Image: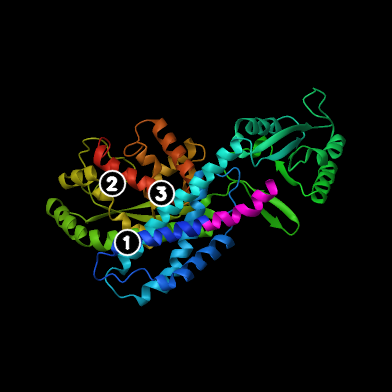
Amino acid sequence: MKKRFYKYFPWLFVLGDIAVVSFSFFISNQLFQPFVDFKGLDYPNFPAFIMIWMVITILKEDYKLSRTNEAEQTFRKLLSSLAWFLVIISMIWMPFHDNSLRLLSFLYLSASLLVFLGIYRVGVLLVLRKYRESGHNFRRAVILGTGGTSDQLAKVFRIRKDFGIKFLGYYDDQDSSGLTRGGISKFFEEAIEMKVDQIYINEHLDEKKVKKIINFADENYIKVKVIPGGSLQLEKNLSFSKYGDFFVINVNDIPLDNAFNRVFKRVFDVIFSFFVTVFILSWLIPLVGLLIKIESKGPIFFIQERNGENNKVFKCIKFRSMTPNDYADTHQAVKNDPRVTKIGAFLRMTSLDEMPQFLNVLIGDMSIVGPRPHTLPMNKVFKTQIEKYNSRHKIRPGITGLAQVKGYRGEIEKPHQIRSRVRLDYFYIQNWSILLDLKICVLTVFELISNREKAY
């Protein structure tokens, strides 16, 4: 049953993908049929589009749904494949269609594919989990070496039935507590009969034994995994680097170390900030600039040095909301601050003073979403007081961030506020995804409308 499942599932998965893509094309076409100017979604080229999607799906191995995958990981993999697909078909489709609806219809098709494929793939993942939870499509596993992280892993197997891993027991030469099935030598005697699929090795097992176990596993087509010790059981994704025949564990990799993720986030930043600059800042800057000039002498913009990615100093641009003073870098704005002008109070209350930072995003100093940048003096103080404070500078700072939508924005009055802000920034950096960015953007709009208590 297990072999048949892995033989047929990839093809069923790809066929399901094709059916969903076809449905998305059909829905998009039906929506725009009433428009006289609409010429259809290129049904003659449809087989080519399907072939492109199949090639991308198979090359990227989207059909491989790991037992331990979460819904977010599955959706992230879909976003990657969909991005490649849309880029390719846009180059084929868009240049040769000059009707006025081509862009709108393409955007609607993109949204349809994202929604329907997202529902399909996450649905398949959830169905597989239920199927495995009911006792089907399982793998037999043993743990060689007891104690510490081995016991933690065994507990995970018992709790997460949806992983579909049937834990058969421990083997260990040193354990005499009766918790094991026997020594390592007994494992070699029983493994074939028990039809073991996976071996998990405690990292403290003797090197010679590990080598013997791996050789045995290779000969009998059994997967081998090593359980990292307690020092490596961290809240982050571990990856590996190979130096010739020597492997090392990369402990502090982050999602944005991946080149594709960085490009994807940057493209989103550039497109978003470009539209804001052209359609909003083009008229907002002259209007607000005039109001600032009428009320007080001084420049329109307040330009302040702040720490960016890798602690690189950049010039952060804001609308000037205070009378010019010598304490802007060292004294935070407080409630009823006498330095704040009347137009400045309005700008701060509506967060319009931050709008010029979209120019920072456009030139590459900032991102739409990321840890909010602090002034240089504040960074020097917080760095000595808070553990891992400097880690928030691993990526570009943002106009908005996870800490801000969770209520930690504005003036820092108590130590726990900056600690919570740093903790949330650290979580964002370790768990970045484009979905998280979009969620933060939506929550930012909600915060701007409903929560104005700290906007001063």
Counting from the top left corner in percent of width and height, residue 396 is at 44, 53
Quarter of the image with the N terminus in it? top right
Q: How many marks?
A: 3
- Count residues near mark 2 (Cα–Cα under 10 Å), then give few for <14, some for 14-19, many for 20+: few
> In the rendered structure, does residue 280 fall within the stretch colored magenta?
no
In this view, the mark in front (3 or 2): 3
Quick one: SS at disc 2? loop
Magenta extent: 1-15
Return the residue at label 2: 326
The quarter of the displayed image where residue 419 is located = top left
**Closer to the N terminus: mark 1 or mark 2?**
1
**Labels 1 and 3: the sequence-earlier one:** 1
Left or right, 86 with respect to 74, comes to left
Q: CA distance from mark 1 to mark 3?
A: 32 Å
Residue 122 horizontal/vertical position (percent): 49, 47
User: Which mark identifies residue 382?
Assistant: none
Task: Indicate whether residue 2 is drawn in magenta.
Answer: yes
Label 3 residue SS: helix
Image point (51%, 59%), residue name: 260
Q: Is residue 291 left or right of residue 76?
A: left
Gap in angstroms between the C-alphas marked 1 and 2: 63 Å
